[in-house]
Image (cartoon, rainbow, N blue to C red):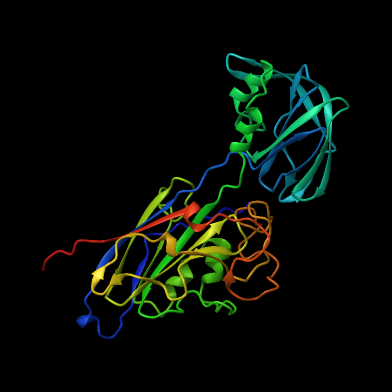
Amino acid sequence: MTTLLLSLSILACTKDTGDSADRVTQRFVITVENVGTLYPIIASGSGSELSLNVPVGADLTLLATDGDQWLLSEATPFYAQGVPQAPANIPLLELQILDGEIQRRRSVDKVQVVMEQAPLVGLTAPDGWEIFGLSAPHGEEPAPEATVPAAWLQALLDGDRSGGEAQIQALTGITHLAGAGFAGVALDGAKLVVLGEADRGEGLEALAEDGNPLRLLEGEGFSNSAVFGDQEGGGYDPLAPGAVTTLEIEASPGEHLFFASMLVQTNDLFIGSPPQGIPLFAGSTPVEGEIVGSLVLYDAGTEANQAPGLGPDQAPRQAAPNTGAPDETVELREVDDDYTYPAPDAVLSVRLAPMKMEAE
């Protein structure tokens, strides 16, 4: 499974504009934070028959009840090297909690499994049983403890289902990362986003599909540019919910900010500035404050879209960078498909602050 990882030094680039000696500049610090929600469960549901999404890199854990006793499965992987290999059935184990820890004993029944159309899995409970299915990211060991909240399990064993399903639903969803991104400065628009045109081969495709902003640093249209990401590991990784990073850019009155960050987990969507950019000055006064309200969710038009968080050609599930079927509409546009995506301000906070200039 390919993960998004860019092991880089801090990179920033200032272009020679030819009249740099006469250029009055202001440095800004940009703070980028992923304000999204971390969901420990990808998909959940219940019933005697159940269809559930189990994407590459996820395991399925099942609970089952006949109204009296409760059974639990191990966390079951459904793929080998990205290829669907669903088992014909999943064993259920007697369940108890001792000293706050989940204990499992012998197998007593099985749930039938059919791989409907990856990542959708069909599950059928034994006669007279109801099953609860929870799909969660794969752990190091095939154990349900990382998937199933112990407090919920204890409540079930105590015969209390009130609020249990609501608790699980609150933990269920697609966790969107903010890909390592790009910030550039220029006087005029159409430097990064050109609506209605095919990708220009200047690096936006690599950012939108794979979270790699490096090629955009090579662009000639920016007076100053930098890349950003989660620097905890000494490199540039996607920003998970709660992660914060900063970068600095330099600009002159009249110049605009051009910003882009991949929306992970999608095929080629990115959060970016409008085509004309975002003004960095009001007259000669540097702009300060939150700017995410000016950002837009775009489709780069380079790869066919799959359901967010589930598609096999999306990072981090894709077999390799630049993997996936081409988009039938080969043009950059605002997102207009039938899937549901978070708004930019549900994923990012982007705050702009002018730095105090030291007297020479």
Locate residue 182, reporting x and y percent: 43, 65
Task: Give the residue at x 59% y 56%.
Answer: 341
In this view of the protein, can residue 147 be seen by the observer?
A: no
Is 41 on the left-hand or right-hand side of 289? right
Q: Is residue 190 above or below residue 111?
A: below
* Label tally: 0
Task: Give the residue at x 40% y 50%.
Answer: 244
Dividing the image into 4 quarters, which one contains the C terminus?
Answer: bottom left
Task: Give the residue at x 61% y 36%.
Answer: 140
Pick out the residue farthest to the right.
127
Locate residue 161, reporting x and y percent: 67, 23
Locate residue 1, reporting x and y percent: 63, 51
| 196 or 185: nearer the viewer | 196
Pick out the residue farthest to the bottom.
18
Is 359 on the left-hand or right-hand side of 3? left
| 328 or 341: nearer the viewer | 341
Q: Is residue 237 above or below residue 322?
A: above
Q: Is residue 179 above or below residue 72?
A: below
When asked about the image quadrant of residue 49, the answer is top right
Task: Give the residue at x 53% y 43%.
Answer: 38
Pick out the residue farthest to the top.
99
Pick out the residue farthest to the front.
162
Is 233 on the left-hand or right-hand side of 360? right
Locate residue 30, reporting x and y percent: 34, 59
| 286 or 105: nearer the viewer | 286
In this view of the protein, can residue 140 be seen by the observer?
A: yes
